[in-house]
Image (spheres, rainbow, N blue to C red):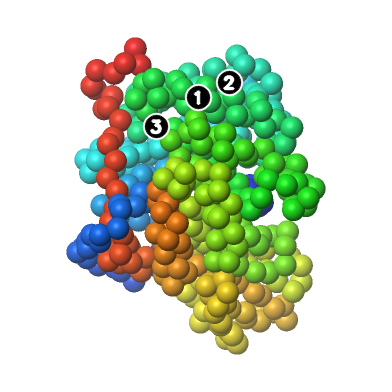
Amino acid sequence: MRLGKECGAFFTGTIKGTTSLSLFLIIVATAPVTLLAHPPTATLFYYVEEPAALVSALTHLNRISVIAPQVFVMDREGFVFGEVNSELLESTRQQQVAVMPLVINRGFDQEVIHSVLDDPSKMQRAIRYLLYYASRDGYWGIQFDFENIHASYRHQYNLFVEEAARQFHQRDRKFSVAVVAKHSDRRQDYSESFWANWAGVFDYATLSRSADFLSVMTYDQHSRGTPPGPVAGLTWVKRVIEYAVSKVSPERLSMGIPLYFRSWNSAGLRGGYGGFPDVVPMLHRPGVVAGWDGNGQVPWFRYPADDIEHEVWYEDVRSFRAKLELVERYGLQGFSAWVIGQEDPRIWVEISRHVSIRRLLSAPRKDQKDRDG
């Protein structure tokens, strides 16, 4: 998904690799995979075009069911542009890893998605473009990640998803939808702006009847516009998932897992965003005070710099493990992790030891006969 996420919208973070991290990635990539008795889990990792993301993806494809690059952008006329990294695409073909690119409204611009939803011909154009790309490059499917849609467009969005899913399924492709995290369908339970522009449009039950699965974006519980706190505290995540499974079969749900941090500061400056590799040096700054939030099952730390107090909430292998346990407890299809390259590298050992990875059939290769015609 993302450029980064603010109540459902995203901001790109810069990832800085290190030699020691690269060595660790190589070590964990060669660790033996232990398959357990519980049903296989679909491990979906989102991908953005960053050097660290490509290195991690190529290293760990054997632990990934679906790689989901955020590469396609739709404009206000329904034209779709983008391309998956050719090296990544070739590696997924060799290792039979499913590819499911994301399509977003450019800049998560509300006027862009509304323009398309207001015109059935534009919706059809977008679907044709996506089917063309899927056929040309052999994608397993496509995920809609349209965000910042006004709640009044709920019916139109349901119809867009229904029609896209119908056409993808006719061509033996999969289709999924990323949905903003909700814990109820009552507008009074949210701020007016969040319900109107982010959460209200998503009708979990109706969308799940069309899509093969929903990726529930259970992250950004706290973000730039809130006081400091967990990106995805476990108590909050459980509340969202309990609502989701009351509307959708667990087998059609993929739980979002953040791999990134957010930071706040006492000066009221714009907060920070990044991955675990960025956290490691910050933990060694002078004056760091680190802790663990027992309710949220997430780590945090504070440090002073230039007379400003900084507070960071992040994700590590411990918080990842706690979220994996929720996937198993609720019998979900799997998880959707944002974003590869930002992770604590120890999660790959965790996956190897405790996750039976679901292997999915790839879409027909571009050089094979296809019914897309």
User: Looking at the image, is mark 2 or mark 3 earlier in the sequence?
Assistant: 2
Report how far apart the C-alphas of labels 2 and 1 lie in the structure. 9 Å
Which residue carries the number 3 mark? Answer: 174
Q: Would you say residue 87 is visible in this rendering?
A: no
Q: Position of residue 149 (x, y in %)?
A: 68, 36
**The C terminus: image quadrant:** top left
The type of residue carrying mark 3 is Lys
Under circle 3, the secondary element is strand
Mark 2 burial class by Cα count in 10 Å: few <14, some 14-19, many 20+? many
Picture disc at residue 164: 1
Toward the front, the furthest residue is 246
Q: Position of residue 175 (x, y in %)?
A: 44, 32
User: Looking at the image, is mark 2 or mark 1 earlier in the sequence?
Assistant: 2
- Closer to us: mark 2 or mark 3? 3
Mark 1 burial class by Cα count in 10 Å: few <14, some 14-19, many 20+? many
The type of residue carrying mark 1 is Ala
Q: Indicate left or right for 23 with 131 as reference.
A: left
Under circle 1, the secondary element is helix
Toward the bottom, the furthest residue is 287
Residue positioned 40% across, 48% down in the render: 333
Q: Position of residue 168 (x, y in %)?
A: 42, 24
Report how far apart the C-alphas of labels 3 and 1 lie in the structure. 10 Å
Residue 139 vertical placement versus 235 (above, below): above
Residue positioned 65% across, 26% down in the render: 156
Residue positioned 59% across, 36% down in the render: 146
Q: Indicate left or right for 242 with 43 as reference.
A: right
Residue 142 vertical placement versus 31 (above, below): above
Q: Would you say residue 190 is visible in this rendering?
A: yes
Which residue carries the number 2 mark? Answer: 123
The type of residue carrying mark 2 is Met
* Image marks 3 and 1: residues in contact by CB distance under 8 Å: no
